[in-house]
Image (spheres, rainbow, N blue to C red):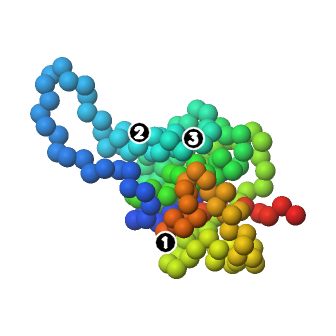
Amino acid sequence: MGLFSFIKNAGAKIFKKKEAPVAAPEAAAPVMTDEQYEIAALESEVNNLGIGINNMNLIMGKSVSVHGQCETNADREKIILALGNVEGICAVEDYIDVTNPEPESKFYTVQKGDSLSLIAKSQYGDPMKYPVIFEANKPMLSHPDKIYPGQNLRIPSLVA
């Protein structure tokens, strides 16, 4: 449980610019508020990644609060990163319960010029350990070369 900070202007652009509402007929469905729209977009982002969470509840405020239950810390951390690596989100408050906890990973913010092998060298002392970082960040990463400055990544501990 805790508060995780992110760079507000970096990340996936899932919040589309909304156009000015047009006068709707009286029988039309109610229009979503900005907050409802953002919550639905964030829920969709997590669901599309297929990360396991039960009873997910998101609350928007100065940060996004996420509640629910996960099997592992890895799933919990992936959900935090999936939410935080969205443009416009500057913090994620974690209230996720984990049923089978394991050691937590470190988070690393990608810098300009970084690659997974450079990050692996700085974190593990071996650039050839980059697949560990890549695998730990699936499904958010689709390819080892597709990282960007400001993105946060999971850096799991190496099992001896």
Where is 26 relative to 128, above or below? above
The numbered mark, 1 or 3, whose residue comes first in the sequence reads 3
Residue 89 seen: no
Q: Which residue is mark 2?
A: 40
Specify the quadrant of the image occupied by residue 56: top right
Where is 146 relative to 63, above or below? below
Instruction: Determine the CA span between mark 3 and mark 2.
Output: 15 Å
Q: Assign a secondary structure to mark 1.
A: loop
Q: Assign a secondary structure to mark 2.
A: helix
Front disc: 2 or 1: 1
Q: Which residue is mark 1?
A: 149
Q: Residue at x 69, y 50 (%)?
A: 74
Q: Residue at x 75, y 39 (%)?
A: 99
Residue 133 seen: yes
Q: Which residue is mark 3?
A: 50
Instruction: Determine the CA span between mark 2 and mark 1.
Output: 26 Å
Report whether 87 appears left or right of 104.
left
Give the x, y percent position of residue 20.
17, 45
At label 2, the amino acid type is Ala
Q: Residue at x 63, y 43 (%)?
A: 96
Residue count near mark 3 (Cα–Cα under 10 Å), binned few <14, some 14–19, many ≥20: few
Give the x, y percent position of residue 160.
87, 64
Q: Nearer the viewer, residue 142 or 17?
A: 142
The numbered mark, 2 or 1, whose residue comes first in the sequence reads 2
The numbered mark, 3 or 2, whose residue comes first in the sequence reads 2
